[in-house]
Image: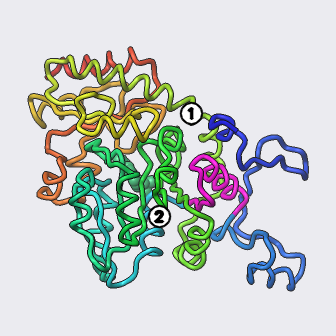
Amino acid sequence: MNFQTKAIHAGHKHDKSVGAHATPIYQTSTFVFDNCEQGARRFEGIEEGYIYSRLGNPNMTELEEKMTALENGGAAISTGSGMAAISTVLLSQLKAGNHMVAGKALYGCTNSLMTHVLPRFNIETTFVDTTDLGAIEQAINNNTKVIYIETPANPTMQVTDIKAVSKIARKYGAVLVADNTFMTPYLQKPLDLGADIVVHSATKYICGHGDVVAGIIVSSKETIMDMKFPYFKDFGGNTSPFDAWLLVRGLKTLPARVDIHCKNAKVVVDYLLNHPAISDVYYPGLKEHPQHDIAKKQATDFGAMIAFELKGGIEAGKTLMNNVKMIALAVSLGCVDSLIQHPASMTHSPVSREDRLKAGITDGLVRISVGIEHVEDIISDLGQALAKI
Ligand code: LCS
């Protein structure tokens, strides 16, 4: 099946009990066993079937099967947030004494997990510019078990060469984890490019409508089973049945939505580039973007996330963000609605100023998640707000 067809049909089974075409919401915490023996078999793992919704639920299964098909993986785990996906992956792949190499520019809470939480369990991270393959290799030591990348990176839009980094991971026996939130499997499939594990904040494009917080992990069947029992089971970061149902619904329109997101983003980039108040625009689709060729090679389009700087610095940025009318001043991204935010004081505030600046997240950087409204309306709103500067 083609991607668009899989987005609609993969994982879907018509409900045989009443013949419902759409999947019912299995809003249940627990599942009834026929008898004690069956309950025991399910707990032993020798009979398939549901036990308790923290371990799995039919709505989670549909979402997991769909995402497995879309990412070309072997299996998936759906989680209660992107951070639940990331923490489950890292705490199952690493143990005390292990080391990780990660990108300098990462979503703020991912950085915070690595900087503030994991060191308490004696897991250290070296942050490097992952666009520099030599820097990755140099940071690896005998205890390095994970290389963690986000590409494009939030919010700098730097692009890491997944295939090249996967070769380094293989050479040193480390697992490559790729956060594919900004691209979605419609535009980029990290497992096909050699990554071992893909994570998503499903809160974003996978949901698409800004009404769910959730995450997804996709990998080989073996890796997912090892992660599920005991880590996922014992950490307890499952998706609620209703949220999983909404995500399945959202995924059906992922290709259609992302096509419009990408088309709109290109028009907005053009507008920003030609606006006298803007000094720099960071978007992998620009020929001038330092990793444009890699982005072109490893993804089918460039997404709809744009970072930019204003000539008037942060004060001009604040004027813009305080004066947009239709575009929401809000964190998150990947919604049908356009969102604008200030990484230094919002999404990346958990990162120290020094580390932020080293990663290229300047005080003046503004990030926009271009929605699927009519692009003329997005530009007209940006235009009236920029005119206030
Ligand atoms: N990975 C990336 C690339 C993200 O952008 C985020 C959240 C996460 C993981 C964590 O996912 P969550 O737990 O929130 O579902 N990014 C946000 C952002 O840029 N604005 O608000 C949240």
* Residue 255: numbered disc: 1
Q: Magenta stretch: give its range.
A: 57-78
Q: Which residue is tagged 2? A: 84
Q: Is residue 63 magenta?
A: yes
Q: Is mark 2 within 8 Å of ligand 1?
A: yes
> Is residue 167 one of those drawn in magenta?
no
Q: Who's the residue at 47% across and 50% down the image?
A: 193
Look at the numbered disc 2 and give the secondary structure of its residue.
helix
Name which residue lies at 33% across and 60% down.
109
Amino acid carrying mark 2 in the image: Ala
Alpha carbon distance from label 2 to label 1: 25 Å
The residue that appears at 29% across and 41% down in the rendered structure is 157
Which residue is drawn at the image coordinates 27% and 28% (left, top)? 287
Q: Nearer the viewer, mark 2 or mark 1?
A: 1
Q: Which numbered disc covers residue 138?
A: none
Q: Is residue 353 above or below residue 336?
A: below
Quadrant where the C terminus is found in the figure? top left
From the viewer's perspective, is residue 140 above or below residue 326?
Answer: below
Q: Main secondary structure of the magenta part?
A: helix
